[in-house]
Image (spheres, coloured by chain):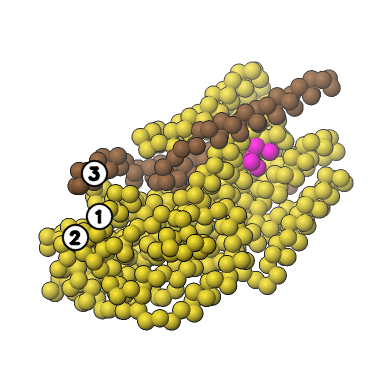
Chain colours: A brown, B yellow
């Protein structure tokens, strides 16, 4: 039992560390215009804490626990759903941008 | 649903998040990337309902669904209706509630486990509470600053550093107390001190640096989510949280670089830069201020005009008026372009979004690298509510806070007109030499009022 527990902990640690590297790599080169939407999109992704909020709401034993868990569900939903919608709205504004660059270049 | 199937679907959701971040890093795939992220998050949320309790309905399922419905009813309209200018603060707010949610999740699990919680889990809980609360209260302060519900300038108070340091020590000590003795009171105190620390930590940050802080707090929330994933032993939360934490850290660094700021200077600069700001305010050299008619005449007889929008344009909501002016000039045969500094406004890309809202044609929005060589052939530059992004001090004054930041070289143009609210320096708090040059004309007032006056003066000519 003890060894099984350890290996699970190590597996989680490995996942954690590998995720750090993936996170670093995946956004290493981004143009400044995309900084805000990227931040907003990443912001929406951590709204997946909703999953955790649902799990704790499921096994809450007291009213206090249930109340806090449901508050977490509400907040996490706002973060996740609102985050993806607002990011999409931002990106809608950017469409057609590469073409604009070309036109400006022709002026010279 | 078996545990293996659940974990595999969770893995797929994790891959969606990686692809989402990858997609968001390039203009062509950004929108698709965001959609992929949304799909991943939805799938991850859906399968919880089927896996937990072996296919039976969740306990409190109705309440949970009601809470989700309520959250959606709050979040979606807010995201859909928010004005372009207010998006940054909405992102800050969403980030804050996410951090708060993660802290709550860890607290509930901690209460639920009671004596059964292992030391590692308690440590992770304390981490989640501290960072989640800091992210929550810090984001609220950034929201208040951006919404102008409080001053946007750095808030410095006597013994600020000492108070912040003491609060941080309090946070760490109370965290240690939770770990060593358990119980709910220490956790409550730890949470409250962390909330206070979040407030104190963001107060000294100046308005221009707020986006960097939002990005940093976003990374914090990511780490909080990862830690609560550890508390709950949920791989997906660890993956998603860590991805956001790591990419958010890099993004924060990139944003600070684009603004020519060091992260350390952003967070702690207010306490050291105070002397410099007051020195700047004391400058009383003469400036040339003009009337709307003077400005209209200058513009009317120009061949080529470049409009440099900044933060003041966003505040005054003057994007439609500036477009009216540009159209009017174009109808009089003046060549008009907008010079867009990548970090003008409150968020990188802010100006593009703002002007797109007013239907300014894309081809008129010219990025810094492309517009800079054209300034010597430009007769008039109209700076609307921008300051730091055209401040030559970034090139000429080593040691000033914005030194090294690329700027728009408007000083090379024939005439420069500044629409400003007052002589107050920009957000970086540095005096702008350009204001005192002979080729510069200032028109004081709210950007929208000033522009409206200039438009009517132009029509009268």
Q: Give the range drawn in magenta.
A: B223-227
B438, A57: nearer the viewer: B438
Q: Which residue is drawn at 36% across and 69% down?
A: B434
Query: Where B394 falls versus B126 (above or below)?
Result: below
Crowdedness near tag 1: few (<14), some (14–19) or many (≥20) residues, C-alpha within 10 Å: some
Secondary structure of the residue carrying tag 2 is: strand
Asked if the residue at tag 2 contacts the one at tag 1, i.e. Cβ–Cβ closer than 8 Å, the answer is yes
Q: How far apart are marks 2 and 3 (CA)?
A: 17 Å
Secondary structure of the residue carrying tag 3 is: helix
| Mark found first going from the N terminus, 1 or 2 | 2
Q: Please state the horizontal and vertical placement of residue B106, each as a whole percent of the image.
A: 71, 42
Q: Please state the horizontal and vertical placement of residue B274, each as a whole percent of the image.
A: 58, 70
Q: Is residue B92 at all visible to an observer of this figure?
A: no
Q: Residue B69 carries which label?
A: none
The residue singled out by tag 1 in the image is B374
The residue singled out by tag 3 in the image is A105
The chain identifier of the residue carrying mark 2 reads: B
Crowdedness near tag 3: few (<14), some (14–19) or many (≥20) residues, C-alpha within 10 Å: few
Q: Residue B304 carries which label?
A: 2
Q: How far apart are marks 3 and 1 (CA)?
A: 12 Å
Residue A9's image quarter? top right
Left or right relative to B430: residue B415 = left
């Amino acid at each position: 039992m003890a060894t099984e527990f350890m290996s699970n902990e190590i597996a989680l640690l490995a996942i954690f560390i590998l995720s750090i590297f993936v996170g670093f790599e995946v956004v290493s080169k981004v143009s400044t215009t995309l900084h805000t939407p990227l931040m907003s999109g990443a912001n929406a992704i951590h709204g997946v804490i909703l999953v955790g909020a649902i799990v704790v709401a499921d096994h809450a034993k007291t009213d206090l626990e249930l109340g806090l868990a449901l508050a977490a569900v509400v907040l996490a939903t706002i973060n996740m759903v609102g985050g993806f919608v607002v990011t999409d709205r931002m990106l809608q504004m950017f469409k057609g941008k590469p073409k604009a660059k070309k036109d400006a270049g022709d002026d010279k | 649903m078996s545990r293996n199937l659940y974990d595999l679907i969770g893995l797929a959701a994790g891959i969606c998040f990686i692809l989402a971040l990858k997609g968001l890093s390039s203009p062509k795939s950004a929108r698709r990337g965001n959609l992929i992220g949304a799909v991943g998050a939805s799938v991850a949320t859906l399968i919880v309902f089927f896996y937990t309790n072996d296919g039976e309905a969740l306990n409190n399922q109705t309440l949970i669904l009601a809470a989700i419905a309520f959250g959606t009813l709050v979040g979606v309209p807010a995201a859909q209706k928010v004005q372009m200018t207010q998006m940054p603060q909405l992102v800050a707010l969403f980030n804050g509630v996410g951090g708060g949610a993660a802290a709550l999740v860890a607290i509930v699990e901690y209460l639920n486990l009671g004596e059964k919680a292992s030391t590692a889990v308690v440590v992770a809980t304390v981490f989640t509470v501290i960072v989640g609360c800091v992210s929550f209260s810090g984001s609220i302060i950034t929201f208040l600053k951006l919404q102008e519900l409080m001053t946007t300038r750095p808030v410095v108070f006597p013994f600020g550093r000492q108070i912040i340091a003491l609060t941080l020590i309090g946070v760490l000590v109370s965290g240690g107390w939770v770990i060593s003795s358990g119980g709910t009171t220490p956790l409550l105190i730890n949470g409250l001190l962390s909330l206070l620390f979040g407030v104190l930590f963001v107060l000294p940050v100046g308005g221009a640096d707020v986006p960097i802080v939002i990005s940093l707090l976003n990374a914090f929330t990511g780490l909080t989510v990862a830690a609560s994933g550890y508390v709950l032993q949920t791989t997906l939360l660890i993956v998603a949280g860590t991805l956001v934490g790591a990419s958010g850290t890099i993004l924060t660094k990139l944003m600070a670089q684009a603004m020519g700021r060091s992260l350390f200077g952003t967070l702690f600069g207010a306490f050291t830069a105070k002397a410099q700001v007051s020195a700047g305010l004391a400058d009383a050299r003469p400036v040339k201020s003009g009337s709307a008619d003077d400005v209209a005449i200058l513009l009317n007889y120009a061949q080529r005009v470049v409009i440099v929008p900044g933060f003041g344009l966003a505040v005054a909501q003057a994007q439609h008026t500036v477009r009216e002016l540009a159209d009017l000039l174009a109808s009089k045969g003046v060549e008009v372009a907008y010079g867009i500094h990548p970090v003008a406004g409150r968020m990188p890309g802010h100006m593009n979004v703002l002007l797109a809202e007013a239907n300014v044609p894309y081809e008129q929005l010219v990025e810094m690298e492309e517009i800079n060589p054209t300034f010597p052939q430009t007769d008039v530059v109209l700076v609307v509510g921008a300051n730091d992004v055209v401040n030559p001090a970034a090139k000429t004054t080593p040691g000033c806070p914005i030194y090294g930041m690329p700027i728009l070289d408007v000083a090379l143009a024939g005439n420069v007109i500044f629409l400003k609210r007052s002589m107050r320096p920009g957000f970086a708090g540095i005096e702008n030499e350009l204001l005192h040059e002979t080729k510069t004309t200032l028109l004081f007032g709210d950007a929208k009022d000033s522009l409206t006056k200039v438009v009517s003066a132009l029509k009268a000519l």
